């Protein structure tokens, strides 16, 4: 029997730590090597056999259906417009009927990049009989993401947010959650109306009841794009890997005489003669002026860096009337 799979891509967040870039672009539409984060996520869901996918909308929400349309290849898309931001649990509520028609529900963060191992997660979920299965990554540092998920030797969740469960089982490892879940659709009946967090509102109560939550740990490349630094690192890693060259969009140009190392030029971004650019991401229509130096930086769309300017360790976007708005690559944490 073919499993019916339906998915929800969490795409409603404000992207506060990526401001001012996300004041004009919703985070799921940010490009990485020529394709938006959302398109890459939908590619993986379609390849896993999803019959349909939903995206929840809030911040700059209408930009997303305008960009993605009503279908992704053969996979229909459904949009859930939230009048208030509902969070990772609350987003499921308006979609109970849509998601409840499936045999399994796939839930994924819309601001992460990974070669998502959906088939392995689904197989693990079905084999273990868990209420939910979470993807963990062994490539991320716990301290950067505020802690992790404690699992036993078989991958069962035994510690979460400072609480221990199944005390007879030893915590064999602690890993960072990678932003993907496989859920039993029966759990949708436990989703309250209104805003909610999936850990506090669903997973912790399940664990306290003795229900099983399973995990799969991946060593595949994984990136959370929540800050300018992480966005820059993801773009460089995906486009270039360990190479020191550059990745250019179809209309991007690097002028003769420019010095460029490890740079990604999206769309029609341009670098003028004499510019020095290293470890940088240039979004469509960004321009680096003659003799300018840009290093460890993200340059927003339609943003012109003046001739001779120096930009190091910053996110820089166009601010109107030729002005520039700047932010550090690692802003203070915000909820």
Image (spheres, rainbow, N blue to C red):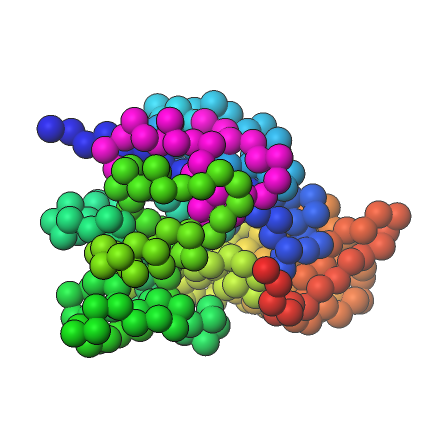
Tell how many labels: 0
Q: Position of residue 96 (x, y in %)?
A: 39, 31
Name which residue lies at 29% across and 59% down: 207
Q: Is residue 317 visible?
A: yes
User: Where 78 falls versus 120 (above or below)?
Assistant: above
* The C terminus sits in image quarter: bottom right
Q: Is 160 rendered above or below residue 195?
A: below
Give the residues in magenta.
78-104
Could you tell me which quadrant the N terminus lies in? top left
Residue at 43% from the left image edge and 57% from the top image edge: 200
Task: Compare residues 66 and 9 and report the one nearer the observer.
Answer: 9
Residue at the extreme front: 209
The residue at the point 39 percent across, 73 percent down is: 162
Taking the spot 35% from the left edge, 67% from the top edge, the residue there is 160
Residue 93 in magenta? yes
Q: Position of residue 299 (x, y in %)?
A: 67, 56
Q: Is residue 215 magenta?
A: no
Q: Quadrant of residue 153?
A: bottom left
- 215 or 208: nearer the viewer: 208
Would residue 99 be found to the left or right of residue 156 on screen?
A: right
């Amino acid at each position: 029997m073919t499993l019916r799979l339906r998915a929800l891509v969490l795409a409603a967040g404000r992207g506060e730590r990526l401001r001012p870039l996300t004041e004009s672009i919703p985070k799921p539409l940010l490009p990485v090597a020529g394709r938006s984060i959302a398109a890459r996520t939908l590619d993986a869901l379609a390849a896993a056999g999803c019959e349909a996918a939903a995206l929840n909308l809030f911040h700059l929400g209408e930009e997303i259906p305008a960009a993605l349309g009503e279908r992704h290849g053969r996979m229909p898309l459904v949009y859930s417009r939230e009048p208030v931001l509902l969070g990772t649990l609350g987003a499921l509520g308006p979609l109970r009927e849509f998601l409840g028609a499936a045999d399994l529900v796939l839930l994924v963060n819309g601001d992460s990049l990974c070669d998502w191992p959906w088939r392995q997660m689904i197989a693990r979920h079905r084999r273990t009989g868990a209420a939910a299965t979470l993807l963990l990554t062994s490539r991320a540092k716990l301290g950067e993401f505020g802690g992790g998920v404690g699992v036993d030797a078989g991958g069962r969740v035994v510690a979460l947010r400072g609480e221990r469960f199944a005390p007879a089982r030893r915590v064999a490892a602690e890993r960072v959650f990678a932003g993907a879940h496989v859920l039993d659709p029966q759990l949708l009946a436990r989703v309250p109306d209104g805003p909610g967090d999936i850990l506090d509102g669903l997973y912790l109560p399940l664990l306290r009841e003795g229900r099983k939550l399973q995990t799969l740990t991946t060593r595949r490349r994984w990136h959370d794009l929540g800050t300018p630094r992480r966005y820059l690192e993801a773009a460089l890693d995906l486009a270039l890997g360990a190479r020191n060259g550059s990745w250019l969009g179809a209309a991007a140009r690097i002028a003769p005489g420019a010095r460029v190392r490890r740079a990604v030029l999206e769309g029609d971004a341009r670098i003028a003669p004499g510019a020095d650019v290293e470890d940088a991401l240039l979004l469509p229509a960004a321009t680096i002026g003659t003799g300018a130096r840009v290093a460890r930086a993200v340059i927003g769309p339609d943003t012109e860096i003046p001739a001779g300017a120096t930009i190091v360790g910053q996110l820089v976007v166009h601010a109107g009337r030729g002005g520039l708005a700047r932010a550090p690559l690692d802003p203070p944490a915000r909820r």
